[in-house]
Amino acid sequence: MSSPTPNPIDIAVGQRVRAIRELRGLTQTDLAKATGVTFQQIQKYERGTNRVSASRLMLISHALGQPVSAFFDAEEPGAGDGLDLFAVNGSKALLEAYARIETPDQRRIVVALARSLAGEASA
């Protein structure tokens, strides 16, 4: 018997938890200690495998310095604010490296390369 598919809202909330945690520079262990659960439980929350209860979400929001509303979107989960992009492995490292590029011309080259690799037309 296979386990049920996680609810898209639970997945979106988990992705936002992960994105904000990574932006704050916290590990899963750091967040786990701050909220009284194991790092494995944080992993399950971030994947949407386990739902985050209201009380636990409040603890997570305090640990991350965000309002509870930061984990939800007024329209659809993950729509529009870009936090869902941080769910992609390596995205934070890529953005950090990009921010260290000093010249606008070099930044444009990096963006053009990324778009080309993604199969997009140059803008």
Image: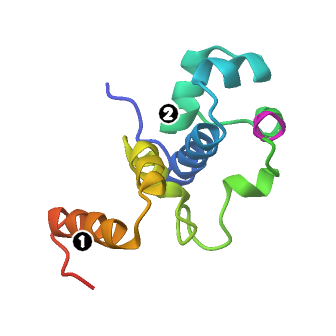
Structural distance between the alpha carbons of marks 1 and 2: 36 Å
In the rendered image of this protein, does residue 10 appear above or below residue 122?
A: above
Q: How is the image coloured?
A: rainbow
In the rendered image of this protein, does residue 17 appear above or below residue 35?
A: below
Question: Relative to the observer, which residue lies in front, 19 or 3?
Answer: 19
Going by the numbered disc 1, the residue's amino acid type is Ala
In the displayed structure image, the side of residue 92 where residue 28 appears, left or right = right
Mark 1 vs mark 2: which is more N-terminal? 2
Percent of width and height locating residue 97: 41, 48
Name the quadrant containing residue 46.
top right
Question: Relative to the observer, which residue lies in front, 78 or 55?
Answer: 78
Determine which residue is flagged by label 2. 49
The residue at 20%/65% (across/down) is 113
In the rendered image of this protein, does residue 123 appear above or below residue 28?
A: below
Quarter of the picture holding the C terminus: bottom left
Percent of width and height locating residue 6: 47, 42
Q: Is residue 87 magenta?
A: no
> Under tag 2, what secondary structure?
loop
Q: Which residues are magenta?
A: 60-64
Quarter of the picture holding the N terminus: top left
Determine which residue is flagged by label 1. 112
Crowd band around label 2 with a 10 angstrom C-alpha radius: few (<14), some (14–19), many (20+) = some
Going by the numbered disc 2, the residue's amino acid type is Thr
Crowd band around label 1 with a 10 angstrom C-alpha radius: few (<14), some (14–19), many (20+) = some
Percent of width and height locating residue 16: 59, 49
The residue at 48%/36% (across/down) is 47
The residue at 52%/63% (across/down) is 82
